Image (cartoon, grey):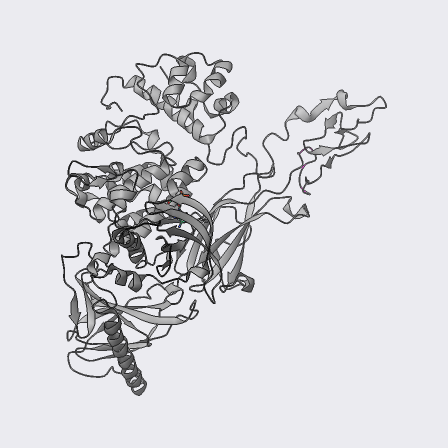
Amino acid sequence: MDLSPAAHTPLHPQQRCGQDLPSQRGYPLGFYVSSWRLGLGGISSRGACRPGFYKASSLDPYCMKCPPHSYSHQEGSSQCTCEKSYFRAETDPRAMPCTRPPTAPENPISTTNETSITLEWSPPRDSGGRNDITYDVHCKKCAGDPRECSLCGSVLHFIPRQFGLTYTKVLVTNLLPHTNYTFDLEALNGVSELSPSPNQYISINVTTSQAVNVILKERKSKDSITLAWQGPDHANGLIVEYEVIYYEKNQKDQNYTVLKTKSNSMTVDGLKPGTTYVFRVRARTSGGHGTYGGEIELETSQEDMLAIGDPNQPTIMAVSVAGGIVLLIFLVTCFVVSGRHCGYIKAKQDPDEEKLQFHHGQVRLPGSRTYVHPHTYEDPNQAVRDFAKEIDASCIRIERVIGAGEFGEVCSGRLKLPGKREIYVAIKSLKAGYSEKQRRDFLSEASIMGQFDNPNIIHLEGVVTKCKPVMIITEYMENGSLDSFLRKRDGQFTVIQLVGMLRGIASGMKYLSDMNYIHRDLAARNILVNSNFVCKVSDFGLSRVLEDDPEAAYTTRGGKIPIRWTAPEAIAYRKFTSASDVWSYGIVMWEVMSYGERPYWEMSNQDVIKAIDEGYRLPAPMDCPAVLHQLMLDCWQKARGDRPKFGQIVNILDKLIRNPSCLKTLANDAAWSGNSLQDPCTPDSSTITTVDEWLDGIKMGQYKENFASAGYATLDTVVYINSSDLCRIGVTLVGHQKRILWSIQNLHTMASQMHGTHIQV
Ligand code: ACK
């Protein structure tokens, strides 16, 4: 069998079935084609053009048929009038069809970086018949209540510009910290201003984070440093406390300390003389934690002395004394209220491994950890109290059931806390008749989730434990879990949008690994997607890997593990680390790039384990950029030390987003390597003899009749099919087209590699 490369050209991401790609800017392809020229056929007995025809100039020899979406009712018309809702721009030739404004841009996605945001979107579904689309971005700023929104004014910077954008991406900088913004993305074309209807737009809501940036003053002695700082300019609520993190320069990985205070100053003592320390401060308001401000490096003095050149010494002394007292009261209160569990304690998942360190009345963190395993608490209810806010059940309105979890139903609803605006939430409830252990395990998810504060980690609103049913309330993610979301939208995103989603997940995982939290069940089904297509890592229950995940299977050692997503060392001897999470992340990348395909398809778990052990890895999904497949392969390095860290993955993806040209080379362009698993979409070519068998083999049997009636009777004819042929045959879904074209390509490759090195699925 021979297959010319042109025979299976992939679809352009924006191309829809039966729709040609645009040609000349502004005008639809072929509008000038002479099919509208009808010669004498359009001339009446009196020599004038008949209705439905026109002649632009009396010198023209022919009458022209009115172009699409226009008409002429009278004889002798010199031009045709546009139908209702269609228009002709001043510069449009009369022979050009009338066009209309575009629909709204689609699939908006935002990436927030403190006070700057990148917005990206897909072109409108309907361009209105034109090819001169531009985009305008309008911005509103809302202080909590949507009724209090105002225009953003000219303080924001839009790069490359705010109006008349020709690309589907813009960077917005200079945003206020911790503020809600709404960006309306509007698509326009050459006739938008002629239409009386408002332009169609789509909104993206984003919230910037809040940083404490400025450390105003400092005072140093040989073993202490006093800091004072200014709170964020625009906090999103009352400041509850500040958190100061510090460590010896270059020693962050060994040891750092987190302290809390309600004051705007703090004296940190017990420091080494003549040593440089790095400090960062963040605020916590009723709305949650802000981001840490920039790093400040300060060196303790060799001798006891006050900072030179500080004109505010008396003030700072007073502030520091006040701060010290507040801090002391705060710490004492914590000890009284929480027993041994004050502030942050070590973040290890094995409760026995390390002991807490107390030092100078502070809680010291061995290593760079802040995650606290609920098992480190003698009383797990205390962990819930420490990390999750108790919500009064009367503030919650349950609206509908959206799914089922191990412990009970998952519902959507609304939460209205006093003094706050109503928000949509997801509500997980614990079904009646639970045991104490089930209650503890159920609530452990809240104790874990409540410690995280990151835009790519699902946010805990609080818990209801004082009445039944016991509930966990989280932010609502409109698009549900990532795997089903992608399956529903097969082929609908640009590669950059997919990379944006992957970047979000990697960033959430970096945050978790920085906190020394190991997820163990990272998979697309455990990622949730909101209305802006922001992906957030979820599913933090203690027992979930064992019980809740339908993918988890028992291993020979008795553990229950989601085999297809899990690194070999974790399957073999339960070595779960951030590096094993990286392996799972590689599988998530594959799931995303294949729009929710099942990893290793229908292979059995045993075959997957064997294939991986023999060195086989998943091949690149259809249309997957080569760099992304390479990154997946890196995540699947056998030696876990050779896998990239999440921080490196975020950096790589950031670079790709900044330089999309790196994504142009597709992995499928290269010949199959011996390191690939055979595509299950391509059945064993030696056993296929008919088109029907082939279609059944790739689960596209529903198109048998379409192929037959289009005259594709033998496999030889099938191999020349391209995407336009598929449209004509009646295969209109992009996902199905991709599957068929990919299979054709692989049929061809298989034929030339028959009896080759691939393992049989
Ligand atoms: O794919 P889904 O719609 O997304 O179905 C599952 C179901 O509940 C059972 O887990 C959905 N789900 C879970 N948490 C949330 C959430 N925070 N927001 C929206 N849907 C959620 C999940």
| Residue 563 visible | yes
Q: Nearer the viewer, residue 387 or 67?
A: 387
**Quadrant holding the C terminus:** top left
Q: Position of residue 30 (x, y in %)?
A: 60, 29
Q: Residue at x 19, y 67 (%)?
A: 364
Q: Position of residue 380 (x, y in %)?
A: 25, 59
Which secondary structure is most common in the magenta stretch? loop
Q: Residue at x 30, y 27 (%)?
A: 671
**What stretch of residues is rendered in magenta?**
91-96
- In the image, taking residue 5 as reference, residue 586 lies left or right, namely left
Residue 125: in magenta span = no
Q: Nearer the viewer, residue 312 or 53?
A: 312
Relative to 589, say whether 419 is above or below: below
Residue 92: in magenta span = yes
Find the residue positioned furthest to the right: 46
How many numbered marks, from 0 up?
A: 0
Q: Nearer the viewer, residue 603 or 226?
A: 603
| Residue 627 visible | no
**Quadrant holding the N terminus:** top left
- In the image, taking residue 242 as reference, residue 63 lies left or right, namely right
Q: Residue at x 39, y 19 (%)?
A: 696
Relative to 74, say whether 745 is above or below: above
Q: Quadrant of residue 403?
A: top left
Q: Nearer the viewer, residue 671 or 56?
A: 671
